[in-house]
Image (cartoon, rainbow, N blue to C red):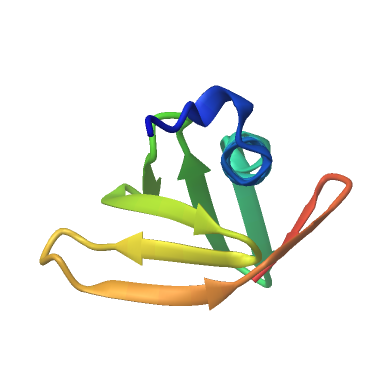
Amino acid sequence: MKLDKRNDPRWLAGLLILLTWVVLVKGQQSRLAGTWQWTEGDVTLTLKFNADGTGALNGDRFRYNVQANKLLVEDADGETTVYKFSLDGDSLNV
């Protein structure tokens, strides 16, 4: 007996969940894209996220990925740091 995945509701449900997850994750990542600044006193940090998953903090380059509310940042040495984050309008909270 040959199974037809197109007619199996479990396969379709799994595909729908996967597609929804991809849209949500990519949506969060694209919402991060842009330049963010934080200033306190005479210190300013400039954080830039590119839509392609690259970025820079005050010129130091990194790669990043978004998983739900977690920001995974890989530095030039290959070390990955995980940050919890949220977006509230035009504010990035890390």
Q: Could you say where residue 50 lies in the image, as x and y percent from the top left?
A: 45, 33
**Whole-percent x and y of residue 86?**
74, 63
Nearest the camera: 23 or 31? 23
Q: Residue at x 52, y 75 (%)?
A: 83
Q: Tally the numbered discs.
A: 0
Which one is in front, 64 or 19? 19
The quarter in which the C terminus is drawn is bottom right
Q: Residue furthest front?
A: 1
- Where is residue 74 drawn, in percent x and y? 27, 62
Is the residue 63 above or below the residue 67 in the image?
above
Q: In the image as oriented, which residue stretches furthest toward the left?
A: 77
Q: Residue at x 56, y 23 (%)?
A: 6
Tell me, yes or no, if residue 25 can be seen here.
Answer: no
Q: At which x and y percent is residue 41? A: 68, 72
In depth, the one of 29 and 37 nearer the eye is: 29
Q: Is residue 74 visible?
A: yes
Q: Residue at x 28, y 72 (%)?
A: 80
Q: Quadrant of the N terminus?
A: top left
Q: Is residue 53 left or right of residue 49?
A: left
